[in-house]
Image (cartoon, rainbow, N blue to C red):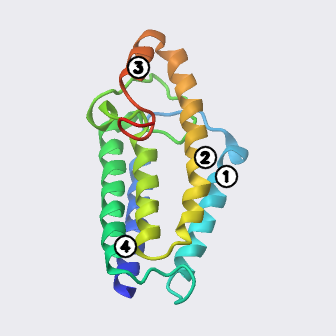
């Protein structure tokens, strides 16, 4: 259990380091200031505290080999999806709910299946983390889920205004977060 917790913790840290480093090559965008970032900062703080305390035995700790295996697979699939989407998006990537200079509508790669695969991947990885090491990570999932749905809706309004015909067509043939479902 400790090895799995350590491996998942290291993978999350590596993921976020990659995320920060790759942000340097993104197109410039408008930012919403501290008020726009505050919910993200709070969620990250809760996640860090949970990760720190998730090694304690007792409530929330997963002691099932089956759940650990399922959680590990979901975690890996989620991070893989988010990274694939980030790479495919290239310089068009930006923080949630930001408008980019010279935006492009990306509808290929993982974007063929869902319009917000980065959000989907992070949420799936959080679910995997909860099932693999500590069910308290469901709290982070419960906080981030509504935030990502809100972000996706705001971004969809921006994209619909920027690409009225193309985005309507894209939206009709894809789902927001879960392929074939939502």
Q: Is residue 46 left or right of residue 66?
A: right
Whether 56 is drawn above or below 8: the answer is: below
Marks 2/1 in contact by CB < 8 Å: the verdict is yes
Q: Which residue is mark 3?
A: 172
Nearer-N-terminus badge (4/2): 4
Q: Which residue is mark 4?
A: 67
Res. 47 image quadrant: bottom right
Whether 82 is drawn above or below 5: the answer is: above
Residue at image position (38%, 85%) is 1
Name the residue furthest bottom: 57
Which of discs 3 and 1 lies nearer the camera? The answer is 3
Between marks 4 and 2, how big is the CA–CA gap? 26 Å
Q: Which residue is mark 1?
A: 39
User: Is residue 24 among the parts visible in the rendering?
Assistant: no
Near mark 1 (Cα within 10 A), the count class, few <14, some 14-19 or many ≥20, is some
Marks 2/3 in contact by CB < 8 Å: the verdict is no
Which of discs 4 and 2 lies nearer the camera? The answer is 4
Between marks 4 and 3, how big is the CA–CA gap? 36 Å
Q: Which residue is mark 2?
A: 147
Residue 6: image location, x then y, percent? 39, 80
Residue 4: image location, x then y, percent? 35, 80
Residue 139: image location, x then y, percent? 60, 64
């Amino acid at each position: 259990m400790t090895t799995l917790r350590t491996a998942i913790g290291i993978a999350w840290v590596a993921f976020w380091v990659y995320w920060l480093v790759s942000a340097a090559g993104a197109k410039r965008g408008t930012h919403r200031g501290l008020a726009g970032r505050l919910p993200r900062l709070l969620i990250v703080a809760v996640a860090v505290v949970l990760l720190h305390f998730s090694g304690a035995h007792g409530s929330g700790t997963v002691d099932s080999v089956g759940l650990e295996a399922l959680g590990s697979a979901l975690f890996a699939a989620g991070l893989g999806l988010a990274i694939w989407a980030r790479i495919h998006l290239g310089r068009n990537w930006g923080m949630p709910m930001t408008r980019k200079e010279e935006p492009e509508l990306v509808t290929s790669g993982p974007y063929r299946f869902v319009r917000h695969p980065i959000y989907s991947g992070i949420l799936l990885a959080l679910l995997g983390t909860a099932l693999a090491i500590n069910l308290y990570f469901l709290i982070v999932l419960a906080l981030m889920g509504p935030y990502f749905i809100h972000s996706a809706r705001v971004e969809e309004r921006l994209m619909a205004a920027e690409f009225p015909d193309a985005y309507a067509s894209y939206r009709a043939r894809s789902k927001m977060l879960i392929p074939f479902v939502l």
